[in-house]
């Protein structure tokens, strides 16, 4: 065979496919240069580990699918059996398909088999033009009898210089909390057993050089693109190997392959950067923005009326909200929970997807017509995967539940899950949603919610999470095929279903049910590690947060919501004239900056004071930028250090000034920095290396800085 070098955007993947077994990953990371065949051979030979005492007689090498038969004693890439047999494999390479066009992604397909175990393996690797690597395995049962698959996970090596790990955890209303620690011997395994991505999902599992930050350090990261149970892990062996990997987390008996049947792993996304965490985000954001289905139109400023009316639906009140929304500059109006039969609170009605005639005697069309008549888009909340026991659907079709025979899973928010793996349940939900969109003129958006974990998720007596996840994907794909103009938001108790597989079928995510601006700063910062701003719903909530009861002024709430898919979740019909004017000014500022915010490069500042956070977005041509500087709490020092503004062209001159069309934040200093009155003009190098001193903001205040070139 040969040694392959996939090379794109300063990233290299070198595979040694000379042996009879599966290819070995020689290198994944920074570009190793334009090596000829002899150079690749020497690089490969130079990385073969030595034979040491009390070890195998031949060097054990790490292949694309780690196998005990090749001397691997860490987490196996494949686990399964055929009635107790064929539990260990020794795949042999059958062939390679290599495609490396100059102006397109590089692609390698590895074909291998183990005739003794009756298994065939296909591994597909793609390195796109931005340096993003994706890996997927396909396992086919070529033997007699069923093969029970327990695990199939792509794995990649990471060099020993990566000594720290970073990932995310969280809970409802506190998603995306970072955790960081040294990478020691053993396995750091993050398993999600929620039947959905989970509030505690890693998003990215990052390994990096000591002290890596947003703008510095060499980092490697993986993301498991799957919306059901999944595993992502980092392992460091005493024998010297370090690996990152991930895939679907399978329950016993969940995947049983009959003769000729196959299983595909979720895509594992892998990305390397020598520019810290922001470098990872650059690659991922660019990849997502280049997708054919990525939203292209300006992201509408959205009013969701949940925190304004909850379940109290009244046509006149909702019309008044729509009128006020239009005056403020809102572009999309979303009617949330409570519009369907029997839904007067969260204990009843889920599954009965018919407009409640008692609340809406003339249906939803009068409200839709009023909203669209104001020039706004109309959206509607649905939760199609769930059912309340107090519903006509549950009473008629209790057998449609995702449950083990003879008992129900523990109740969660008074609801159970429909088994969409059942054709009759799937067909019912598809028919109801299709009819809802077909029978109403003007519904252009669905807020698609999913408010519980899948616990004891049984399908005909067997585990059902895999089938449920695949069915949800099919449902979304079919609905979008029938209604291509309808956008869909992924909401799952807030941010419990955020991954690149669900985002292949939706247009944004609801990052959290928490609209507390202080909490949201962190939630949005770390959600943005994976997703660009235009895919993250960021709304201005009421003065007092209904989840934390913390109180913030409008400026802090609006500055926090500015950097994303902007919106409002507040009873704007009851606000004062002054609040309405200020809110309209913030909406106008977002619209003015929207082309930059939703296309530029995200940068986050490594500031030495933990009470000061700063982040921004820089235009692709580096002609303009916008930054936010937030004071989270009081500082140990009286005056925090200057805030550096990264990402600009070091040789250009820029004018920096506070955003003039919104009120200035409150400060505690007796004299503000002199440059704030007129702005300051400095080179990009000076702004990145020296920065600017900002005023002494009160805790929980933000300052918005606009930056433009002057030459």
Image: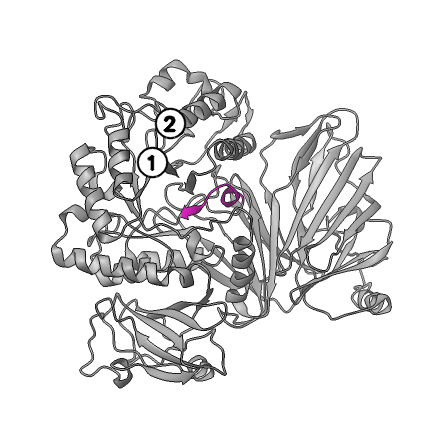
Q: Label 2: how many residues lie within 10 Å, few (<14), some (14-19) or many (20+)? A: some
Residue named by callout 2: 436
Look at the image and say whether residue 167 sits in the magenta stretch.
no
Residue extent of the magenta highlight: 501-509
Distance Cα–Cα, label 2 vs label 1:
10 Å
- 323 sits to left or right of 514: left
Q: Is residue 475 left or right of residue 544?
A: right
Q: Is residue 218 left or right of residue 43?
A: left
The answer to whether residue 18 is visible is no
Residues at discs 2 and 1 in contact (Cβ within 8 Å): yes
The residue drawn where x is 50% and y is 66% is: 278
The residue at the point 40 percent across, 84 percent down is 682
Q: Work out whether 257 lies above or below 268.
A: above
Looking at this view, is 293 or 306 the one in front? 293
SS assignment at label 2: helix
Q: How many marks?
A: 2
The residue tagged 1 is 380
Q: Quadrant of residue 593?
A: bottom left
């Amino acid at each position: 065979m040969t040694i392959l070098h996939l090379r794109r955007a300063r990233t290299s993947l070198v595979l040694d496919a000379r042996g009879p077994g599966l290819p070995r990953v020689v290198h994944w990371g920074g570009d190793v240069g334009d090596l000829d065949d002899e150079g690749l051979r020497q690089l490969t030979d130079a990385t073969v580990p030595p034979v040491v005492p009390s070890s195998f007689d031949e060097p054990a090498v790490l292949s694309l699918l780690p196998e005990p038969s090749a001397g691997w004693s860490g987490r196996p890439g494949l686990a399964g059996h055929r009635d107790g047999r064929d539990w260990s494999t020794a795949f042999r390479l059958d062939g390679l398909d290599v495609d490396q066009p100059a102006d397109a992604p590089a692609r390698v397909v590895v074909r291998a088999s183990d005739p003794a175990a009756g298994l065939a393996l296909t591994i597909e690797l793609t390195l796109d033009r931005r340096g993003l690597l994706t890996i997927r395995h396909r396992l086919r049962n070529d033997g007699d009898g069923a093969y029970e698959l327990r695990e199939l996970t792509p794995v990649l090596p990471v060099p020993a210089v990566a000594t720290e790990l970073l990932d995310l955890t969280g809970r409802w209303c506190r998603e995306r909390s970072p955790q960081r620690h040294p990478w020691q011997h053993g396995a750091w395994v993050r398993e999600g057993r929620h039947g959905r991505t989970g509030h505690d999902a890693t998003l990215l599992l990052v390994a990096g050089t000591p002290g890596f930050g947003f703008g510095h350090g060499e980092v490697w990261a993986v993301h498991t693109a799957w919306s059901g149970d999944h595993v992502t892990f980092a392992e460091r062996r005493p024998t010297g190997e370090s690996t990152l990997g991930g895939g679907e987390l399978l329950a016993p008996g969940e995947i049983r392959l009959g003769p000729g049947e196959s299983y595909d792993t979720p895509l594992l996304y892998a990305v390397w950067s020598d520019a810290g965490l922001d470098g990872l985000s650059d690659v991922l954001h660019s990849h997502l923005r280049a997708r054919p289905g990525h939203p292209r139109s300006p992201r509408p400023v959205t009013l969701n009326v949940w925190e304004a009316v909850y379940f109290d639906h009244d046509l006149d009140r909702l019309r008044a909200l729509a009128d006020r929304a239009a005056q403020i500059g809102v572009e999309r109006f979303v009617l949330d929970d409570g519009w369907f039969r029997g839904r007067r609170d969260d204990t009843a009605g889920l599954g009965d997807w018919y407009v409640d005639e008692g609340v809406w005697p003339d249906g939803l069309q009068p409200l839709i017509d009023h909203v669209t008549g104001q020039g706004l888009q109309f959206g509607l909340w649905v939760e199609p995967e769930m059912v309340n026991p107090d519903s006509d659907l549950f009473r008629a079709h209790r057998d449609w539940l995702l449950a083990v025979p003879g008992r129900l899973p523990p109740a969660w928010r008074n609801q159970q899950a429909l088994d969409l793996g059942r054709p009759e349940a799937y067909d019912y939900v598809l028919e109801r949603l299709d009819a809802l969109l077909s029978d109403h003129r003007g519904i252009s958006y669905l807020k698609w919610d999913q408010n519980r974990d899948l616990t004891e998720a049984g399908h005909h007596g067997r585990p059902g999470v895999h089938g449920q996840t695949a069915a949800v994907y099919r449902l979304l794909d079919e609905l979008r095929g029938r209604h291509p103009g309808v956008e869909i938001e992924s909401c799952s108790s807030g941010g419990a279903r955020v991954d690149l597989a669900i985002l292949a079928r939706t247009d944004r995510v609801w990052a959290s049910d928490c609209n507390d601006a202080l909490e949201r700063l962190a939630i949005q910062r770390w959600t943005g590690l994976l997703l660009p701003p235009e895919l993250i719903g960021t709304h201005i909530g009421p003065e007092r947060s209904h989840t934390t009861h913390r109180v913030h002024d409008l400026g802090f709430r609006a500055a926090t919501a500015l950097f994303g898919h902007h919106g409002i979740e507040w009873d704007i019909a009851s606000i004062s004239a002054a609040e309405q004017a200020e809110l309209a000014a913030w909406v106008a500022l977002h619209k003015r900056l929207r082309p930059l915010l939703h296309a530029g490069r995200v940068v986050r500042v490594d500031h030495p004071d933990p009470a000061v956070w700063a982040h921004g977005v820089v235009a692709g041509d580096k002609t303009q930028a916008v930054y936010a500087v937030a004071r989270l709490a009081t500082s140990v020092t009286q005056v925090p250090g200057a805030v550096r503004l990264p990402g600009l062209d070091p040789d250009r001159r820029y004018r920096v000034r506070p955003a003039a069309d919104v009120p200035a934040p409150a400060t505690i200093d007796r004299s503000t920095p002199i440059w704030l009155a007129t702005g300051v003009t400095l080179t990009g190098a000076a702004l990145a290396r020296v920065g600017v001193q900002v005023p002494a903001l009160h805790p929980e205040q933000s300052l918005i800085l606009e930056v433009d070139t002057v030459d």
